[in-house]
Structures are given as C-alpha cells and as structure tokens.
C-alpha cells in the first residue's frame, strides 16, 4: 500500500507527537512564559496513538518519528515505544529528543527498538545553552549523548537551530565537532512560530552558513541517501562526521516532502504549517479503524504543495508553537 498525494509525492513518514510538555523552554520554540498546556484528557492515550499509527502504517507509512514537546518526559513512553516498534509493516522507529533524559533512558530506548536518535543541541557553551533553553544544563545533554552512544545507537544527528547573534559564532565549533566525532551536525534555519514576530532578525539562510564554513574549511557535498531527510549534507575533507543544512525557510524541499504529522491531541496535519489540521478524535471515539485509515488518506490527498510565507504578514497563526506540533 502506498500513499501518494495530489502532487505525486510519496508520503511514507509520520511525525508523531506524544506530548506537548517539555523539560526545556527553548526560545525559538516557546514564548518565555511557556505555552498553555493541553489538559490531560485532551492528550491521546497510548492506545489511541497506537491505533492511529497502525492505520497510518496500513495506509502506507513505513517510518515513524516520535517527537513532542519532549517525548521522553511522557510517563510510560518506553513500553509504548516497544509496542509501536512491533507494529507489522513499520520499518523504522526513530525519535527526536533534547537529550536531557538520555542518561537514564538511552538503554531502554535501544531495547524498545528505537533505531536512531536526532538530538537537539544548540550550543556547546554552558551559559549559551542555558540562555537558549531558558535554564537547561549542557552537561545533562552531553552525558545523554554519551549514554546513547554507549547504548549502541548509530552516530547521532545533532540539530542546531541557528540564531544570529545568539549562537552563530559557534558554527565553527560545531564544524570541529564533526572533525572529532562521526555526528551529522545539521544547521537549521530558524522558522517563525506564533510568538516570534522578529524571527527574520534571527534566521540565517543556509547558503550564508555554508559560505562562512567554506571560507575556513575545504568542504565536499555528499550524495543524498535515504537517511538525508530534509538536509543537504557536506563533509569537511577527511572528517569522520558530516554537516547538514536544513533550509526550512529559504530552501525548496517541499517538492520532495514525504511527511504527515499527528499532534499529541490527535490533530493530523498535511504540512507543518497547515492551520488547525483535522481532528482524529471523533473517529477514534467512534471506534471505526477503516474510517480512520480513510481519513489519513484524505489528509494526504489534501496535503498542500508547501508553505507560503510571502505576502502573508500574519503567518504563521499566533497559536503556532513547535512544541505543540513536534517540529
Ligand atoms: N519546514 C519543515 N521543517 C521540517 C520538516 N521536518 C522536519 N523539519 C525541521 O527539521 C528539523 C529536524 O527535524 P528532526 O525531528 O530531526 O527530523 P528529520 O530531519 O525529518 O529527521 P530524519 O528522519 O533524520 O530526516 C527540525 O527543526 C524540524 O522542525 C518539514 O517537513 N518541513
Ligand atoms: C519541537 S522539537 C521536539 C523534540 C525535542 N523536544 C527536541 O527538541 O529535539 C523538534 C525539533 O524542532 C526544532 N524546532 C523547534 N522550534 C523551531 C524553530 N522555530 N525553527 C526551527 N526548528 C525548530 C527543534 O530544534 C527540534 O530539533
Ligand atoms: S525545541 Fe524541543 S526541547 Fe526545546 S522547548 Fe521545544 S520541544 Fe522543548
Ligand atoms: S513546509 Fe510543509 S510541505 Fe514543505 S517540507 Fe515542511 S511539511 Fe513538507
């Protein structure tokens, strides 16, 4: 079974957010006062998340990325992941995390069948890390990274959201990291969210990042592989690790988009920037999984061609926060 949208794109990747809660408050993701948390009864139960996943896989999804908020703060996440990983037809279960809880959970994640981890790490300097995450401890994230390596995960993808004047002076430190370790460090263009009216001042185009790196290092472009995701990848000649550029704003990866999203409250979205999305809860409540699967197909059919920021000053909607959608 395959899911093809009305622009001919094959949709085989579900980003499943399991919670809107988080143990950090990253500036680019949430407003300073945090966001209004969903009441517990509005968060899908693990049973419902499994039903949605099962029908998505039956419709043609082969990879599920569990995200949040911070997925590791949800109680009972490990047994849930173990069940999710056993879904017949699911080829890949992966997870995106801020790494803070990996010290205690990495082994359990490996045992639960999670294949790979993408870890957000926006600074290698304790005070800047604390400033961006509003209080996070860099040492927790770094020991999480180490624990995940020890647990046997393949080299991590490290996500760095670059913000001009905040952490862009660390670009070369991250490049150096790829010369020491086999990580794939990905620089992400800051995307606008509901609370970031001045996002343009922070967002650094991927082309500029590459130019800055190329002034100092000899870099070579890497071929796309099935694991490239939305990044264009490069390597400093001779380095064990690699560098990725995720041009979420200036680039044009919408044409090859293969994703569908479901939020922790059961809203399915064809695009990261789709407004409200389609509420799957009535279908879950009705108990008809065939209808649920059909709705997933309908959402894929209605998937927009991409984001359209230009000419829309009020974009994205004020209620848009990455932590509520899963990035
Ligand atoms: N605009 C846009 N940004 C995305 C999309 N998917 C992921 N991102 C952003 O890319 C960054 C990295 O996301 P991850 O959670 O690591 O997932 P990924 O890059 O899809 O992961 P892979 O499975 O390794 O390709 C985050 O900032 C996401 O918000 C997308 O479909 N559209
Ligand atoms: C919303 S987080 C959820 C998972 C986990 N808490 C984490 O931080 O990895 C998923 C991804 O979205 C990215 N993200 C959040 N807000 C963003 C923004 N405004 N622009 C670009 N990426 C963003 C984060 O850096 C992270 O890599
Ligand atoms: S980016 Fe991840 S870690 Fe940071 S506030 Fe958002 S959900 Fe939490
Ligand atoms: S903006 Fe929308 S269409 Fe473009 S890559 Fe992201 S989710 Fe896909």
Image (cartoon, rainbow, N blue to C red):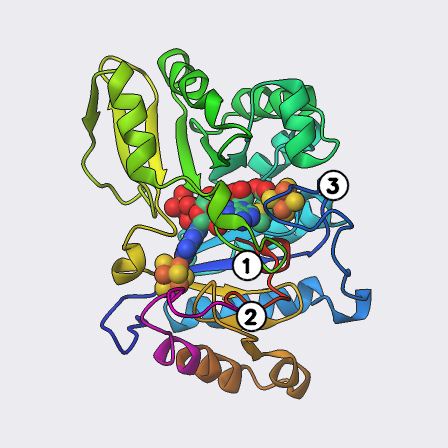
- Disc 3 packing (10 Å; few <14; some 14–19; many ≥20): some
State yes or no: residue 306 in magenta. Answer: yes
Q: From the viewer's perspective, is the residue at label 3 or at label 2 nearer?
A: 3
Say if disc 1 is inside 8 Å of ligand 1.
Answer: no
List x then y, in percent, for residue 257.
32, 60
- Residue beneath label 1, please? 16
Q: Secondary structure at mark 2?
A: helix
- On the question of residue 82 being in view, the answer is no
Say if disc 3 is inside 8 Å of ligand 3.
Answer: yes
Query: Quadrant of residue 254 in the image?
Result: bottom left
Question: Could you tell me how far apart the alpha carbons at marks 1 and 2 are, in whole angstroms?
Answer: 9 Å
- Residue beneath label 2, please? 52
Q: Secondary structure at mark 1?
A: strand
- Disc 2 packing (10 Å; few <14; some 14–19; many ≥20): many
Query: Quadrant of residue 219 in the image?
Result: top left
Q: Which mark is residue 203?
A: none
Label 1 or label 2, whichever comes before in sequence order? 1
Q: Which mark is residue 23?
A: 3
Secondary structure character of the magenta stretch overall: loop
Placement of the N terminus among the 4 image quadrants: bottom left
In the image, residue 91 sits, relative to residue 144, either above or below, namely below
List x then y, in percent, for residue 142.
61, 21
Q: Secondary structure at mark 3?
A: loop
Magenta residues (range)? 298-314
Q: Tell me what residue is drawn at x 49 percent, y 72 percent.
A: 55
- Residues marked 1 and 2 touching at CB (< 8 Å): yes
In the image, residue 50 sits, relative to residue 281, either above or below, namely above
> Is 14 placed left or right of 252 in the picture?
right
State yes or no: residue 322 in magenta. Answer: no
């Amino acid at each position: 079974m395959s899911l093809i949208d009305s622009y001919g794109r094959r949709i085989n990747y579900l980003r499943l957010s399991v919670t809107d809660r988080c143990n950090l408050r990253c500036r680019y993701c949430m407003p300073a006062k945090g966001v209004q948390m969903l009441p517990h009864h509005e968060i899908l139960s693990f049973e419902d998340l499994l039903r949605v996943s099962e029908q998505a896989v039956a419709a043609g999804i082969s990879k599920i990325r569990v995200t949040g908020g911070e997925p590791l703060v949800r109680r009972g996440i490990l047994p849930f992941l173990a069940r999710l990983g056993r879904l017949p037809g699911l080829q890949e279960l992966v997870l995106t995390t801020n790494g803070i809880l990996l010290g205690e959970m990495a082994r359990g994640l490996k045992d639960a069948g999670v294949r790979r981890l993408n870890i957000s790490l926006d600074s290698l300097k304790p005070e800047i890390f604390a400033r961006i995450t509003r209080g996070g401890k860099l040492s927790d994230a770094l020991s999480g990274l180490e624990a995940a390596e020890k647990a046997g995960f393949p080299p991590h993808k490290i996500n760095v959201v670059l913000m001009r004047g905040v952490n862009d002076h660390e670009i070369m430190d991250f490049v150096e990291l790829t010369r020491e370790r086999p990580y794939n460090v990905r620089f992400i263009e800051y995307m606008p969210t509901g609370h970031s009216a001045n996002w343009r001042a922070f967002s650094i185009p991927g082309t500029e990042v590459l130019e800055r790196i190329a002034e100092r290092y000899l870099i070579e472009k890497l071929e796309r592989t099935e694991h490239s995701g939305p990044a264009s990848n490069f390597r400093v000649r001779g380095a064990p690790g690699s560098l990725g550029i995720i041009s979420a704003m200036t680039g044009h990866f919408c044409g090859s988009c293969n994703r569908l999203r479901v939020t922790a409250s059961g809203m399915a979205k064809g695009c990261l920037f789709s407004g409200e999305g389609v509420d799957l809860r009535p279908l879950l409540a009705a108990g008809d999984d065939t209808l649920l699967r059909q709705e997933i197909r309908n959402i894929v059919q209605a998937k927009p061609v991409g984001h359209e920021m230009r000419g829309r000053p009020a974009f994205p909607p004020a209620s848009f926060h990455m932590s509520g959608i899963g990035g």
